[in-house]
Image (cartoon, rainbow, N blue to C red):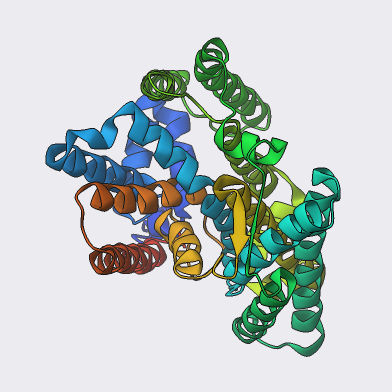
Amino acid sequence: MTASQTPPPADPTAAAAVPADLQDERLIAAQGFGGWASATWARLRSGDLGSLPVVVGLVIIWAVFYALNPAFISSRNLVNLTLQMVPIGVLAIGVVLVLLLGEIDLSIGSMYGLSGAVLVVLFVNQGMSVWVAVLAALAAGAVVGLVYGLLFNRFGVPSFVITLAGLLVLLGLQIRTLGKDGTVNLPFESSLVQFASQKFLPHWLAYTLAVVVPLVYLLARLRTNQRRSAAGLSAVPVTALAVRAVLLAVALVVITYLLQRDRGLSYMVVLFVVLVVVMDLAIRRTTWGRSVLAIGGNVEAARRAGIKVKRVYLSVFVLCSTFAALGGILGAARLASANQSSGGADTNLNAIAAAVIGGTSLFGGRGSAYSALLGILVIYSISNGLALLSVSADVRYVVTGAVLLLAVVIDSLSRRSRAAHGRA
């Protein structure tokens, strides 16, 4: 071979120049299930942990509390746990949305309290229909979010400052709405209280859902595989999808069995799970959701790509406050009352901590609606377990704060590792 025919020396950095995601695609396409397993392990090693830390943490928490007090996983306690976590869990869904933008809403606790006050005053004191009262409370949340969004877009005031001011204003409105009595009780026979505390799925329906949900998941992922294959992209191996579906089915059937030994699965819990699923689909499958993630990742790049940034900010602030209002409605229904302390204490802490602990990044652009579900389950598992052990409230706050700090540290380290491996 002549000098002119000699191929150029290989560039040792050529492999490194290939984006990590493209390397994963090539590996899966070439090796199938083995390639998918290798790519998954590579993502975990690079800091792309997803929900793994919170799932592992939840298993450890449940194992520890069960060892200390077997009553922790009794059917009655698990039913109580699911009912307790829903109102704040709904707040956490809204928190996930604003965190995906890299923003924050500090007034969700006050909005929670105000919506409950609007509900009980209109329904009990004014004699309006329960549905009119519910819609009015939700509308109050939407209006507050609209004001936040307009202030943020028009004047560029940081969301921290806007919502901190909103916290005080809404707290004042809550006290004013409840009046001199300070507490208004909901009648126990009302449909709202019954829905939040007394309505449970029939046994057959609960078990049917435990089987159908994994099947729907499997069919949806197979459909996604077909679309990816048609586009010339790699797909998750069917074996891996089947394993996931089977594990999900086993987990749901076991949980359903434990809950059905007592009262069962509440309609309110089902509503919460449905909201999580719907918002997850909205984030992952819609143009709006992809715009939220793009803005959270790099707002200037999103603006130059033609995304209506101000419109997205406005929609997210409205959704966050509306979810806070819905959480307040469910909270008032759960306790059959609303008072001046509703939404106070650790409401803000638990909702924000749940979103972060569940895996939503404080830096924006990464997270999932499922973070609200997983995070609130961790928060209330800790609170419930410590209560069963008769641990004082001060220790509960310390433990919850330590778990929150750990979650943020993991998020920061994962973010740094992803950047170093080209997966940021």
Of residues 350 and 133, the one drawn nearer to the viewer in this rendering: 133
Of residues 254 and 197, the one drawn nearer to the viewer in this rendering: 197
Of residues 164 and 190, the one drawn nearer to the viewer in this rendering: 190
Instruction: Mark yes or no: residue 360 visible.
Output: no
**Residue 177 appears left or right of 336:** right
Q: Residue at x 34, y 56 (%)?
A: 47
Is residue 45 positioned above or below 194 on the image?
below
Instruction: Mark yes or no: residue 375 visible.
Output: yes
Q: Residue at x 58, y 52 (%)?
A: 331
- Residue 208 image-quadrant placement: top right
Q: Position of residue 80 (x, y in %)?
A: 41, 38
Q: Position of residue 413 (x, y in %)?
A: 32, 67
Q: Position of residue 36 (x, y in %)?
A: 40, 33
Of residues 117 and 310, the one drawn nearer to the viewer in this rendering: 117
Is residue 116 positioned above or below 162 on the image?
above
Q: Please, which residue is most extreme toward the left here?
A: 67
Q: Position of residue 81 (x, y in %)?
A: 40, 41
Q: Please, which residue is most extreme toward the front here?
A: 181
**Residue 65 appears left or right of 412:** left
- Residue 315 image-quadrant placement: bottom right
- Residue 254 image-quadrant placement: top left
**Residue 338 appears left or right of 287:** left
Is residue 130 positioned above or below 361 on the image?
above
Q: Residue at x 34, y 62 (%)?
A: 407
Q: Residue at x 58, y 62 (%)?
A: 95
User: How many numbered discs, if any?
Assistant: 0
